């Protein structure tokens, strides 16, 4: 049964192959180029929310242009076979989103999937968005990201059913559950059980702490129908990210000690309004160390503003700028093309699965 | 290369088979009966530290008696082939241990492995214990449990080399890293890389958050040569545990919300002396809720003392007694014989590996 479910998820994306690799919709940093590169190499890329809701129209228009203008031979033939859906997904942070604008974008551009995250009003908001987006584009899959067993149970009691649930473990970068998160290796199977195994008919993909083929193979072993990576794609040539930020993702090691969940970066850069219960993981830098040493917030904010003028030097262990990233940074050692990353992940994971099979 | 390493680890234990299942040396609760049952079913059981250092002699004597008195047909033939080492390991908490007593026990009983954890003085203590135990019983493997990349680097710079490193992720129950822990799915590969892949010649096993075949298969995918389970064996018939405690492990669900790391249980039961940097994970109960609600420590302690007189009713969501357990409690639904648990883990993990292979 599980096999049927997994096959049916990846098979909904005609260009995709197994192991099914998915690029997370990271805010701003997952732009059209990154998302398309991931899909072109047999994965599924998501465009993240922009600075403001309207940006999604710009990004989707750019993506459509990239697909239309590309020489046919540079794109998988199967891109055209998916009921003319765009071969990328799109991510929405519900608390900061606008369902009218989102519906218009989904209706106009028809991305193959819409990923919903962080509602202000829980399942009620998820139901509203799911209904509205399905009305706008019935073939666009609805993916919902959760990080707790309770959210899984809420979905089962909700008025709508997503096509896919993204289970995000506490190792993930950027925003996730603040205090009630748990590592992927335990959280994923417990949520899978809470959903009643395969009987729910909902696809299940794993996110959080995965940056190489070992993590991909582990997530598949846990029962995931696909595996989501975010931080790994921050270190891709197509990521919409400052060089200094990207280099810090490559440089930093020891994910346990060099990252933490803190609201400090949000506060310093003036990001407010996240619903209760969420916090971001980021790489520690001078802002954090000074904060720990007792430097006052106003002074930290002044120094932060100064650092924003330093360009790429604003990042790094002695930098001060917000450096959201996952605990997997210690597994990431170089910037590569996203397509190469996807290929390597699939090859590594497949090799591991073959090796462990040969040991049985 | 990795294949060679894995084969060579499990092959050091002639009765053991792959996937290699290991029972953690849980303090008091992992007694001779549990350890032997795990080894008899093709895994490797460890006896945990007792209430006082001398208890290990009693437990090892009992274990030797169990092996000697058993009818030959009830034991794996290969039990006798291992240079007359006892077919179980033994665990030491170094900060609370006595290296003289430990050396005498290891010399007298020759367990196949000694698992060292929580030194007060870091690598220096680990070096001392490793040398002393190897002197006492050269064929006894030395296993060292760590939870950070730094500890792995310390081992590489140490005077002695263990045979096996146990990488314990933050999901684990009982004591582990307090503030610098990380989930197994990210921690394990990062430590494996820090150790230089296979070149170190040290076996690597994974612990933390694993309670069923999915977790076992995931750990193998991460590259583990064996997989350690603790909490799962609390719910075994052979565990040396109160019924009320055991039933709570079975009852509790939602590992993220129903467990946490806290020193509260240690303080309430008068357990002091753990080195800096360690804390235990346990299941939340009335002691914790009252503590959160502001009830004073003296009152909590009085209520705790009363609860100790209630027998099995002292545990449970309305109980007050220390209930150390891992975040995997939501994956554990019944008490079973340890041998059945080991068999099921191996079957489930093997089925998953076969299924994922067939999907490539």
Image (spheres, coloured by chain):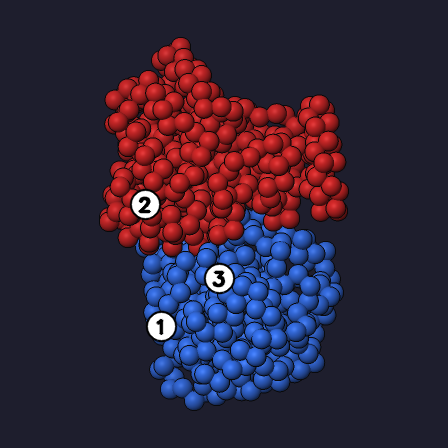
Chain colours: A red, B blue
Quick check: do tags 2 and 3 share a chain? no
Residue picked out by circle 1: B335
Marked residue nearer the N-terminal end (3 or 1): 3
Which residue: 55% across, 35% down? A272
Q: CA distance from mark 2 to mark 1?
A: 30 Å
Q: Are marks 2 and 3 in contact (CB under 8 Å)?
A: no
Tell how many labels.
3
Which chain is mark 2 on? A
* Residue A215 visible at all: no
- Residue B57 in the image: above or below residue B227: below
Residue picked out by circle 3: B259
Crowd band around label 2 with a 10 angstrom C-alpha radius: few (<14), some (14–19), many (20+): many
- Residue A139 in the image: above or below residue B14: above
- As helix, strand or loop, the secondary structure at mark 1 comes to loop
- As helix, strand or loop, the secondary structure at mark 3 comes to strand
| Residue B328 image position (x, y, % from top left) | 44, 60
Crowd band around label 3 with a 10 angstrom C-alpha radius: few (<14), some (14–19), many (20+): many
Q: CA distance from mark 3 to mark 1?
A: 20 Å
Residue picked out by circle 2: A155
| Residue A191 image position (x, y, % from top left) | 37, 51
Q: Between B179 and B152, which is closer to the camera in this rendering?
A: B179
């Amino acid at each position: 049964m599980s096999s049927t479910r997994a096959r049916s998820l990846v098979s909904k994306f005609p260009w995709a192959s197994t192991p099914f690799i998915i690029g997370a919709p990271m805010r701003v940093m997952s732009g059209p180029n990154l998302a398309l590169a991931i899909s072109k190499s047999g994965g599924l890329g998501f465009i993240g929310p922009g600075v403001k809701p309207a940006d999604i129209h710009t990004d989707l228009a750019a993506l459509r242009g990239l697909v239309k203008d590309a020489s046919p031979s540079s794109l998988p033939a199967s891109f055209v076979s998916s009921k003319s859906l765009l071969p990328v997904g799109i991510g929405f942070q519900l608390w900061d989103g606008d369902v009218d604008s989102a519906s218009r974008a989904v209706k106009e551009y028809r991305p193959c999937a819409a990923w919903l995250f962080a509602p202000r009003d829980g399942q009620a908001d998820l139901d509203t968005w799911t209904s509205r987006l399905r009305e706008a584009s019935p073939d666009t899959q609805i993916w919902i990201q959760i990080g707790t067993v309770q959210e899984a149970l809420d979905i089962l009691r909700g008025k709508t059913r997503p096509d896919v649930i993204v289970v995000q473990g506490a190792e993930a970068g950027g925003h996730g559950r603040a205090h009630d998160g748990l590592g992927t290796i335990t959280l994923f199977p417990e949520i899978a059980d809470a959903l009643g195994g395969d009987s729910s008919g909902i696809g299940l993909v794993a996110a959080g702490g995965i940056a190489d083929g070992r993590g991909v193979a582990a997530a598949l072993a846990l029962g995931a129908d696909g595996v989501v990576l975010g931080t790994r794609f921050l270190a891709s040539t197509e990521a919409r990210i400052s060089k200094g930020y990207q280099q810090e993702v490559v440089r930093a090691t020891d994910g346990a000690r060099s990252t933490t969940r803190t609201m400090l970066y949000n506060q310093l850069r003036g990001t407010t309004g996240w619903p209760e219960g969420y916090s971001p993981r980021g790489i520690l830098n001078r802002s954090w160390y000074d904060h720990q040493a007792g430097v006052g917030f106003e002074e930290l904010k002044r120094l932060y503003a100064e650092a924003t003028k330093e360009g790429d030097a604003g990042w790094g262990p002695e930098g001060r700028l917000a450096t959201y990233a996952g605990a997997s940074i210690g597994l990431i050692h170089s910037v590569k093309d996203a397509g190469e990353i996807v290929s390597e992940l699939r090859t590594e994971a497949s090799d591991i699965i073959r090796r462990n099979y040969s040991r049985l």
